[in-house]
Amino acid sequence: MDLMSIRPRAVIYIRVSDPSQIDNNSLETQEKACRNFLKQKGWDLAGNIFREEGVSAKHVSTRPALNNLIYYSTKKENRVSFVVVYKFDRWSRNTQEGLGAEALLSRYGIELYSVMENVTRDPMGTFIKTLSLASAQMENEMKGIRVADNQKTMFRNGYWCWKPPTGYRRPYGIKSERKGKECLIDENIGPMIKYLFEESSKIHVSKMELARRLNFMGFAKFYGKEADCNLISKIIPKTFYYGYMYGPKWKEYSIGKHQPLIDEETWKKANINLFGNKAKYNFKDTNTYPIKGLVICSCCHKPMTTTGPTGNGKVYYYECKNKKCEHQQRMVVDKAHTKFFDILEKVKPTESTLKLFTNMVFNEWDRTINDCQKRADEIDKNIKDLKESIIDISNSNKKGIFTDEEAKEQADEVRKKIVVCEIERSDVKMEQYDTEIVRNFTEQFLLNLDKLWNHIDLPKKQALQNRIFPNGLICENHDIRTNGLSESFQYIETLNNLNSSLVTLRGIEPRLAE
């Protein structure tokens, strides 16, 4: 009998999760390593190589090449004895599903081998394999967290992370070139959406009539289908069009870096005309007295309460109702809010102050970020050294320095250390990402302090007010003033004053040396 006909047969499975990796050396490297592995083992390649190009390993059921592999391998006439992968994380990043798929192959007498993780066929080997699959799953889940965190950071910094609203588009170019760039107004549909808001802000126009006008302007040619009432109902309430973004995923608001199509007043009028009293504004303040409890009477130092209009009056007040107070203070709500915004405008840092604040206050955060990166680099180096030591152990075994049992025992210990290092690296990277997110949000928050206050819900307003003005605001003679700032904002105020004192007075120019 021909010896070649009785040699074991194996199939090769290779995979990349990102389509952008298909054209580089990732698949080629995996295939070459797997072919060499078959050659070393003396196995024949059964059928074609099963290639998974640009498919995630999170779920087995969504990977056609893997399903084809299982179908092919379990057919008796194909005589498959082994499945070879470059690493176990190429097989699956879901521990339960990966082990389940392997168990299915085992029922047909087919064993799963990894080129880079040559585990033994004993309880310890099974344990190491399970750890490898679990580590791959953890890495996949941590990656998902990092992606979500990065997405939140982008949103908080003013960049829209999803499909742009109708009337906007992504910048042209490949994905890597578009990253970190704001949405652009669509040259064709943008003017139509602007017209839609302007018309609906002037007079009451039905949604059907607005849709008809859009279609008359050729909306379907660029959008792909004609406008209808449902589309109008989705477009008009979006605050994105006047520059404020709402992230439903986190229920947060952010000031967008994109160019607004309209101003806020036009947006409000359009919503009132189209939806009437049923308009649902994302930023609508349902509380008439948002700084209630913050304003304190200058005489009795008690928090001031509120008074609604009496009779036909339309004026609301903050006022002191302490009967023992000799000079009960009182202030019109609208005037109090105007003054409050003036105070917010003064206490927020200028851009030049923020640079000083960043250099001084953010230094500790920057050190944490840098330390995390250095630690991650060290762990990467340790992992690389450990993997190289496995190769050294294998070479020593071939030269007879180690017996098979000694080599197996040492290699198992090294692989355990690798798993521990990979887990530690994930923890370090998460700490780094968390710190970067806090730092970026704080910078964006400080620059837009007065605008953010006007567009957050009441509990967040109260929390923000208490952080800035821990001792409240003093009301005296129909005016309000600060009663001391928090330590951080005292520091910002000092930096603001320092910067303003360094500015050259208007009309006095520095003389150049002749």
Image (cartoon, helix red, strand yellow):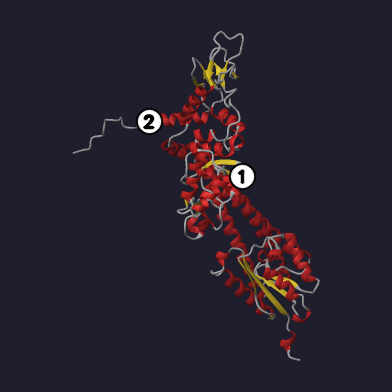
Residue 25's image quarter?
bottom right
Please provide percent x and percent y for residue 401. Answer: 66, 72
Front residue (pair 407, 161): 161
Q: Is residue 116 left or right of residue 158?
A: right
- First along the sequence among labels 1 and 2: 1
The residue tagged 2 is: 500
> The residue under label 1 is which amino acid type?
Pro
- Tell which residue pokes out farthest to the bottom in this image: 1
Residue 79's image quarter?
bottom right
The C terminus sits in image quarter:
top left
Please provide percent x and percent y for residue 100. Answer: 77, 64
Front residue (pair 334, 55): 334
Q: Please tell me how crowded label 2 is: few (under 14), some (14-19), or many (20+) other residues with Cα within 10 Å.
A: some
Mark 1 vs 2: CB contact within 8 A: no
Can residue 261 be seen here? yes
Q: Is residue 150 above or below residue 115?
A: above
Q: Is residue 303 left or right of residue 80?
A: left
Q: Is residue 453 above or below residue 178?
A: above
Q: Is residue 160 above or below residue 458?
A: below
Q: Kindly report the distance in space between the C-alpha atoms of the residues bearing marks 1 and 2.
A: 40 Å
